[in-house]
Image (spheres, helix red, strand yellow):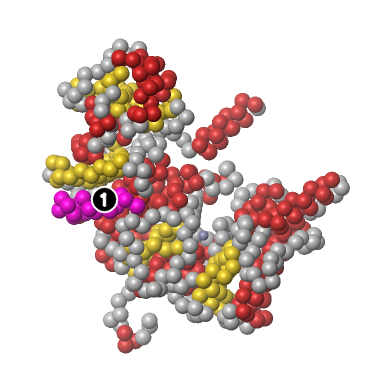
Amino acid sequence: MNVLAIDTTSYVLGVAILKDGMVAGEYITHLKKNHSVRLMPAIRGLMEEVDITPNQLDRIVVSEGPGSYTGVRIGVTTAKAMAWSLKIPLVGVSSLEVLAQNGKHFSGVISPFIDARRGQVYTGLYESRQGIVTCVEQDQILLHRDWLNHLKKQEKSILFLSIDIGIHVKEIKDILGEQAVIPPMTEQFPRPGELARLGMEKEVTGEVHSFSPNYIRLAEAEAKWQENQKQKETNK
Amino acid sequence: MGDAGMTEEKNIIILGIETSCDETAVAVVKNGREILSNIVSSQMESHKRFGGVVPEIASRHHVEQITTILEEAMEEANVSFDELDGIAVTEGPGLVGALLIGVNAAKAVAFTQNKPLIGVHHIAGHIYANHIVEELTFPLLTLVVSGGHTELVYMEEHGVFHVIGETRDDAVGEAYDKVARTLGLPYPGGPHIDRLSQEGEPTIPLPRAWLEPNSFDFSFSGLKSAVINTLHNAKQRGEEIPVENIAASFQDSVIDVLVTKTLKAAEEKKVDRILLAGGVAANKGLREQLSTKCEEAGIKLTIPPMSLCTDNAAMIASAGTIFYELGYRSNDQLNGQPGLELPKIKP
Ligand SMILES: [Zn+2]
């Protein structure tokens, strides 16, 4: 199977191509530059490099979030429009599940996370058995402090994976001490090759048209509106 | 075009995409003038409860809708990708998150189908909506009036736009919405004020911002304040001004400035053709006044039908066709540009 995988959910821009199920090329940058400008040249460049044309693709895989709203949408829009115009399936994979693959050989539990500002993180809990990573607590958004206190009860080593590790490392160590395992910077990046593999192994479920990002969170205006409605109800 | 001896001349078919605000729109246009399909999915209903367009919600709708609308437009036009000569997309101005959906979808389809990509300025699109109605002749002047724009654009030829006047504060549509909110009218307020003003009399003297004698610029924020002050003072005196009369007075003041400046600019630039463009072109009062004044001055006026005044992708495809013919191309690095200025396509 020939697969194109796209990840623009964070400052890490990732593109991978599998040819006959094998990684033919991976492209990763970690730059505070505009994904909208750089994604399509990255896709074109890598496809030319590995010598594959759009109509030879069998599947598009995209990191569906959580992450930067705008970033997620750039990847998902590109993936949807490519899959639709090529008449091939589109598969979405959680950005946290992709990152968790870096702990594939870790015995313990894995907490991949993405900073969500104001002390919050997007995170979930993953576990690996014989190199196969499964989700044990689903992706969510919450205060990192609350999450770390919750993990403390696990009585297992916990592997923390995030490109935002720098701004959270102190809090992690303060709360979890020796229980926390923090790998070097080079292992904190989501690998587009892993995204492509996960997407290749997944079953195609929905239609391209109805595919939408997994933001985890409602738009702020929407959340406020719903809160107001609730208050109106209780004041009645 | 239309020359019997030139039957072998190839048709140019362009796919247009527009997502600059709260409409997800895709169209297919032949030779810049013949609409093969023009699909517009409006999000108006989702934004109503917020009293205006919420950018994040608009972006979420666009990404959900985009391929569905693309497919509808292609199917209704009954064309295959092979038949397309290029893909035109609004690159700006507009809401950046919303623009990004159209731009990235356009780039993706242009890449997979190996088609030229043409970035189009949203206002150029509004102007070329008139080209669909009746072929453009030059020189001409366009009055662009919408929720985000108030501009006078002068053109001597295809693809070269000279902005000779623009608003210094609120756009016309914005002023309408703000005044409507003051009057307690629902969003979007423009149509309500237009309707009410047909029933009222312009009894309240409201200011007209003429600015410097030679300026074709506009200003509407003072007018909005004047309406608020008038209401406030009347309330303190215990008087009640009929809402119809406030609407009529406000509309009278807006239209007076728009029409007077447009005709003055037409005279100075010696144009014999005026185009009306943008969502506020739906305003009945404006259409009537401008028609009357143009007729008196012997100037030919074009006003597109409603479906081409409000945001749509046929206008983007039409402008895109002209740009395509002029040799203009965008590349893979095309981006959404919220503050984009009107381009000069011709070198
Ligand atoms: Zn518009």
Question: Helix, strand or loop at disc 1?
Answer: helix
Above or below, B8 against B104 in this view is below
Q: Nearer the viewer, residue B238 or B27?
A: B238
Decide if ligand 1 comes within 8 Å of the CB at mark 1. Answer: no
Magenta stretch holds residue B274: no
Above or below, B250 against A130 in this view is below
Left or right: residue A56 compared with residue B249? left
Q: Nearer the viewer, residue A58 or A112?
A: A112
Q: Position of residue A218 (x, y in %)?
A: 46, 35
Left or right: residue B13 compared with residue B266? left
Question: What type of secondary structure mainly makes up the magenta span?
Answer: helix
Magenta stretch holds residue A44: yes
Amino acid carrying label 1: it is Ala
Q: Tell me which residue sits at (50%, 46%) in the image.
A: B55
Q: Tell me which residue sits at (38%, 16%) in the image.
A: A175
Q: Position of residue B159 (x, y in %)?
A: 44, 72
Q: Is residue B31 in view?
A: no
Q: Position of residue B279 (x, y in %)?
A: 56, 61
Above or below, A118 against A38 in this view is above
The residue beneath circle 1 is A42
Q: How many marks?
A: 1
- Quarter of the image where the C terminus of chain B is located: bottom left
Q: Tell me which residue sits at (50%, 59%) in the image.
A: B311
Q: Tell me which residue sits at (30%, 41%) in the image.
A: A30
| Chain identifier of the residue bearing label 1 in the image | A
Specify the segment rendered in magenta: A37-54
Residue B170: image quadrant is bottom right
Residue A102: image quadrant is top left
Specify the farthest residue to the right: B237
- Quarter of the image where the N terminus of chain B is located: bottom left
